[in-house]
Image (spheres, rainbow, N blue to C red):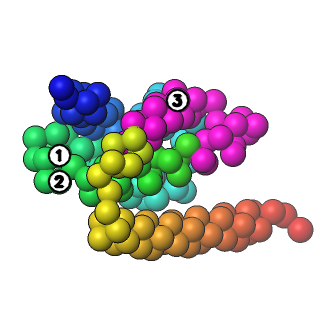
Amino acid sequence: MKSFIDKTIKPFLVIAGLGTCVSGLLVFSPQFAIENIFKLPFAEDYIIFCQHWSLLVLLVGIFMIISAFRVGRRTPVLIYSAIKKTFLVFLYLSNTSRSFSAGFQGGGLLWMQLSSYTCYYISGRATADLLIPLVFTMIVECRVRWLCLFYCSFQTDLSSKKRTPH
């Protein structure tokens, strides 16, 4: 008898992949996606960062759909996806007291479900030779994002100081 994961993995990957690809709208129409999907005010200063992030998420969604039909690609794609979505859950939960988190409520609930399912899948299939390179990639990506955020906030501080009359 097939397990729950064996019965549901293919439709899960297609549906979750399509849902993940929705963030790809930021690549092509950042203002529309930020204002209508995320319910946040559009800030043109961060458009490059948003489009870069969106492209990465779009690619994860595409790889999830591909892995639905290519069994050999599932575990690495799902490990990467689980790490990203679990971190998003952490970010969402740690910022629920802030007003901007309202735009991420639907995403936060979806990310919790997706990360739970993928962690359940990974728990029975992950090996160290798959985990180590993916964790290293995530660490590098998080450092790059931190540097981008630091640079953006530094630039914002500088631009606000220029505008302030003395």
Can you tell which mark lies on residue 146?
Answer: none
Proximity of marks 1 and 2: CB atoms separated by less than 8 Å: yes
Instruction: Decide which of tag 3 and tag 2 comes sooner along the chain.
Output: 2
Mark 1 vs mark 3, CA separation in Å: 23 Å
Residue 24 shows in the view: no
Q: Is residue 32 magenta?
A: no
Q: Observer-nearest residue: 120 or 144?
A: 120
Q: Which residue is mark 3?
A: 109
Residue 145: percent from left, percent from top: 51, 66
Mark 1 vs mark 2, CA separation in Å: 5 Å
Q: Nearer the viewer, mark 3 or mark 2?
A: 2
Furthest residue in direction left, as rendered: 69
Residue type pointed to by label 2: Arg
Furthest residue in direction right, as rendered: 166
Q: Which element type, helix, strand or loop, lies under badge 1?
A: helix
Q: Is residue 113 magenta?
A: yes
Q: Observer-nearest residue: 87 or 132?
A: 132
Q: Observer-nearest residue: 121 or 10?
A: 121
Residue type pointed to by label 3: Leu
Q: Which residue is mark 2?
A: 73
Can you tell which mark lies on residue 67?
Answer: 1
Magenta residues (range):
90-118
